[in-house]
Image (cartoon, coloured by chain):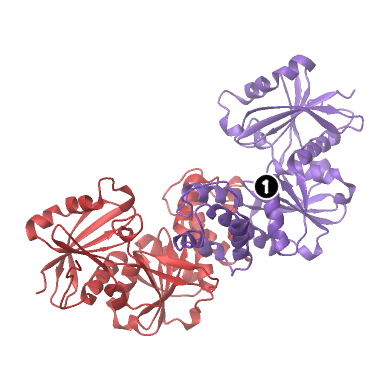
Chain colours: A red, B purple
Amino acid sequence: MTPQYVIAVDWGTSHLRAYLCKVNEDLTLSYQECLTARGVSKVSHGFEQELFDCIEPWVEQFGNLSILMSGQIGSSIGWKETTYLACPISPKAVAASCLRFNCREHQLAIVPGLHCSHENNYRDVMRGEELQVLGWLAQNPKHTLGRHLVCLPGTHTKWVLVEDGQVVLFKTAMTGELYDLLIHHSVLIQHPNDEFNQQAFNDGAKYTLASELGSLIHGIFSVRSKQLFNELSTEQAPSYLSGMLIGSDVRAALNATEWQFTQLDSVNIIGSNTLSKRFSEVLSMQDISTQLYAVADVTLAGFSSIYQDLNITQRLKIKK
Amino acid sequence: MTPQYVIAVDWGTSHLRAYLCKVNEDLTLSYQECLTARGVSKVSHGFEQELFDCIEPWVEQFGNLSILMSGQIGSSIGWKETTYLACPISPKAVAASCLRFNCREHQLAIVPGLHCSHENNYRDVMRGEELQVLGWLAQNPKHTLGRHLVCLPGTHTKWVLVEDGQVVLFKTAMTGELYDLLIHHSVLIQHPNDEFNQQAFNDGAKYTLASELGSLIHGIFSVRSKQLFNELSTEQAPSYLSGMLIGSDVRAALNATEWQFTQLDSVNIIGSNTLSKRFSEVLSMQDISTQLYAVADVTLAGFSSIYQDLNITQRLKIKK
């Protein structure tokens, strides 16, 4: 018998976000409430304790609900390590490989990560973003036909190639982490600030989009030299740097050997409003139109997809 | 009358290195002794005090010696701000623009920095390295004829194009600073260490040398994924990252529009033994042979060059 409620937990490095979800008649989930707690790297007294302290109000009200989890909680520094599944892979195969276990008489499942191999003999990995890609696939039947690129900007940008409903391969760029390091620890930025300057951002993006081979490592010093010659204010510098890094990331995606933009049916961005808009703007400078999706919606759709694909007759039944 | 001794001070961001130099008959300088003190960013009680505390033994012994200074001491965060002189420029013009002043009855001179403009409308700057380039030019008459590239690896790599004895232009790459940030603050490296692994370094360098457009920002995540799949040990990871970054820096230099390697008379590296060797190895992977020069020798030659080019009859005479 279908339970009325499920708890979906997005448990990353920095944050835990638990969602109480209502199970609809078509087995999709709807958010009811959200509770937050510490991320994987910040938990000191055990993951079980952290989780059950967080969801205590719901347990008191509803009893032993099933719990779906995704993110770094399944990594080597998390609660239980799940494997990285090899691409190409279908959503059903991901669901079938969820790590299930029992805890305090709750049924739990952790979504595994993905890996893929590139031509130059190195493997790439993701953990957490796969849920959003599955959610995006589940949101619209059109997404499961043809060849699509899904860009997920964040600490690490993931560029994911999806074809006929399967995750084919993906590439990781450390754009967000590099931005953060350079903003806070480098000679480039004297006064970190969040005031976005559109013109400076555009200038930075155009610089790297139009530049020569490998020029990021050479060109990035212009963030400092432009300030020395008053061509860029200290307030504008972070926006210019953001443009340079996103421009470099987008240019690398445009030149990737793994896909051709001319052969894609769509280019999609899943992320925060701010970041998605920046990537969209830079792609539009190269005449690439994009469709933007909110992380929260796609994540919920991902949990719904996993929930539906778990063995229907034995949904979330425990492997003892 | 020529003084018998001069004090040459290399005063950078982190360190002050003062050299007591003997003035030879041909007006070249020879190191006698070295004293050290705090760098520009660490001086709390005034630059004058820091300097004279440091050189006190020499002042007691020799009286009011002339003092030549180079490096960040001439920057906006230094003692006296010197200009950035525009390239192309000759050594004599650099010497002529030294900022001279009097302090405690000593004659002082600070060597100015350089700037140049690139095609893509951004200006590059150097402060400190120009002294070493002048020293390299002064070391051998052959260096003042033809077209040469001088690479100065460090926190920021400088690639300097020298033609017929003039500094024509240069490019800055943040290779060393990026390495330092990624080693200490990123997800790529769990255990920073200094044990160099040649094979891992070569693999990293080959990766970026052979890679597609802009792939540094995409490829750098392989430092982590290779560790996840046991293709790289945590001990080897710093060497691999070093190879990737130097490979990217060298590749950008090879593809720079400002010079053609086939039209250069020589490629030279001025730096620490360790770093110079790494750059030399990566360049040799692309069949570029290099000549290596020790920083200490070239710096002394630079101070000698400046000293000789200061107005001969009024050497270090003060502008009041």
- Judged from this view, the residue extending furthest toward the right is B25
User: What amino acid type is highlighted by mark number 1?
Assistant: Thr
- Judged from this view, the residue extending furthest toward the front is A320
**From what the image shows, is residue A61 above or below residue B92?**
below
Q: Quadrant of residue A28?
A: bottom left
Picture coordinates of residue B129 (x, y %)? 71, 43
Judged left or right of residue A7, residue B256 is right
Chain ID, mark 1: B
Observer-nearest of A80 and B169 = A80
Picture coordinates of residue B218 (x, y %)? 51, 64
Q: Secondary structure at mark 1?
A: helix
Observer-nearest of A244 and B226 = B226
**Number of marks:** 1
Q: Can residue A215 be spotted in the picture?
A: no
Picture coordinates of residue A277 (x, y %)? 40, 64
Q: Which residue is mark 1?
A: B274
- Callout 1: few (<14), some (14-19), or many (20+) C-alpha neighbours within 10 Å? few
